[in-house]
Image (tube, helix red, strand yellow):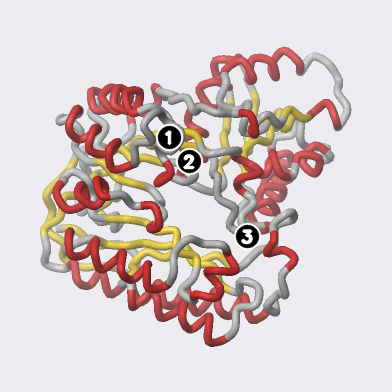
Amino acid sequence: MSIDVVTFGCRLNAAESDVMRRHVEAAGFDDMIVINSCAVTAEAVAQARQTIRRLKRTRPAARIVVTGCAAETEAQMFAAMPEVDRVLGNGHKMAAQSWTGVRQSFDFGVGADEKIKIGGLGMMRETALHLDDGFAARPRAFVQVQNGCDHRCTFCIIPYGRGPSRSVPAGEVVAHVRRLAARDIGEVVLTGVDLTAWGHDLPGQPRLGVLVRAILRHVPELKRLRLSSIDPAEIDADLFAAIGEEARLMPHLHLSLQAGDDLILKRMKRRHSRADAIRFCDEVRRLRPDVVFGADLIAGFPTESDAAFRNTLSLVDDCDLTFLHVFPFSARERTPAARMPKVRGETVKERAGRLREKGEIALRRHLASEIGRRRRVLVEGANGRTEHYARVRLARAAAPGAILDLRIVGHDGHRLLAA
C-alpha cells in the first residue's frame, strides 16, 4: 500500500497531516496521495498545483485528494484539474468518516462540481483533539489546541479557510499531553491558527497562560513544552509568568509581527505598534534572559515606502530577532489588501531578499554566540534541536527522542556542531 500525504504551510497543517494519514490507511486505500494545501500566498497555491501535476505523472494510477486551506478558498480551481479526484475542506478532513465516504464513492464517476466537499466552517464552534498513534516513534509531537481566527488582518485569507476561533478545553489538552508523555515523547509543541486566542470561547474565558501552567503542573513527566507562533498583542499575565518561571517551557518564541512600521501595521489591521513589539521583547528578555525570538515578516505590503521598509528591516535588530520567516507580499482575492496600491514586483522581491539576508546574519550571530556552551539537545535523527530551537548536527548517533547534554564546538552557518 502506498499512501503519501504532502504537506504545505504551517505546523498546524503538519499535525493534521499525521492524523489524516491514519484515517486514509484505516479507510483501506491502496494508492493515494493527499495534498494538504496552504492558502497564505499565491505561491503556496501554485506549488500545490505543480506538485499535483508532477505526482500524477510519476504515479498515474494514484488517487489524489486535495485538502487544507487552499481547498477551501480555491475549491473550484482544484476540482477543475483532471489530476484531482476529490477536494475535501478543512471542516471535513479530520473526520474518519469523511475518508470512509471518499473511499466508498470512488466506484462512481463524478463531475467537477460533485468532486467538492467543503463548507460548514462558519458554523463550527468546537475543536477536537486527535491522538495520532504514529507519534510513538517520534521525538516531537504537535498538539492542536486551537483552530480558526476571529481577526481580519487585511492581507490574510486564512479565516476563510479555517473558520472562527475555537479552543480545546484544558482538561482534554492535559489528558492528551499526559498520554504523549507516557510514550516518552521528548517535546510537545502547542499549535493553533491563532494560538494566543486559546480560551476566549470557553467558559470563564481562560487565557493561554492558564493552559500552559496546567500542562506543566499536571504532567510533571513532560520533558519540554514549546509554543508555536504567538501574537504579542494577546500575551496574558500567566503566560508572562510561565515564561519567567517554568524551565520546561522552552526559551524560544516565534512572533507574528509582520512589519515594523506603524502606518503599515495599521493598514494591515494588526493590533500592535512597533513600540509594542519592542516593549514585548524587552519584557520577555527581562524575565528570561536567554530567550530567542523568531518572527514572521512581510516584505512589500501595499503602500510600503522605502522608509517604512527600513523600519521593518531595523526591527530585526531592535527586537533582536534570530529566526525569520520572510514572505513577499502576495495579494489574496477577497482580502482588503488586494485592493490597495501595489508595490512594484521587482521592489517586493528585492526587499524580501534584503530581509532574508538580514535574517541570515542574525542567525549566524546567534550560532556563533553558542560556541563553547552546553545545550540540552533533543535528538531527531542525525540532527537535533536546542532549547532555543537551533538545529544541531550530532557527532554520533543517538536514539530519537533522547535529550542529550552536549557541548557546542562550532557552526556551519545554518546549524550548530556538537562535540
Amino acid carrying mark 3 in the image: Thr
Task: Give how far across and how far down residue 41 sits, in percent.
Answer: 63, 57
C-alpha separation, residue under disc 2 versus residue under disc 3: 22 Å
Residue 224 image position (x, y, % from top left): 22, 41
The residue identified by callout 1 is 144
Q: Relative to 181, is 354 above or below?
A: below
| Residue 407 sits in quarter | bottom left
Residue 374, by quadrant, is bottom left
Residue type at numbered disc 1: Gln
Q: Which residue is mark 3?
A: 154
Sequence-first tag of 2 and 3: 2
Q: Secondary structure at mark 3?
A: loop
Q: Residue at x 18, y 58 (%)?
A: 418
Report the Cα–Cα distance between label 2 and label 1: 7 Å
Task: Assess whether mark 1 and mark 2 are in contact (beta carbons under 8 angstroms).
Answer: yes
For the residues marked 3 and 1, what is the alpha-carbon distance in whole angstroms?
25 Å
- Local secondary structure at mark 1: strand
Whichever of labels 3 and 1 marks the residue nearer the N terminus, that label is 1
In percent of width and height, residue 27 lies at 60, 15
Identify which amino acid the numbered label 2 is placed on. Answer: Leu
Residue that carries the numbered disc 2 in the rendered image: 12
Kindly give the residue lying farthest to the bottom in the view shown.
Answer: 307
Label 2 environment density (alpha carbons within 10 Å; few <14, some 14–19, many ≥20): some
Which of marks 1 and 2 precedes in the sequence?
A: 2
Q: Residue at x 47, y 76 (%)?
A: 312
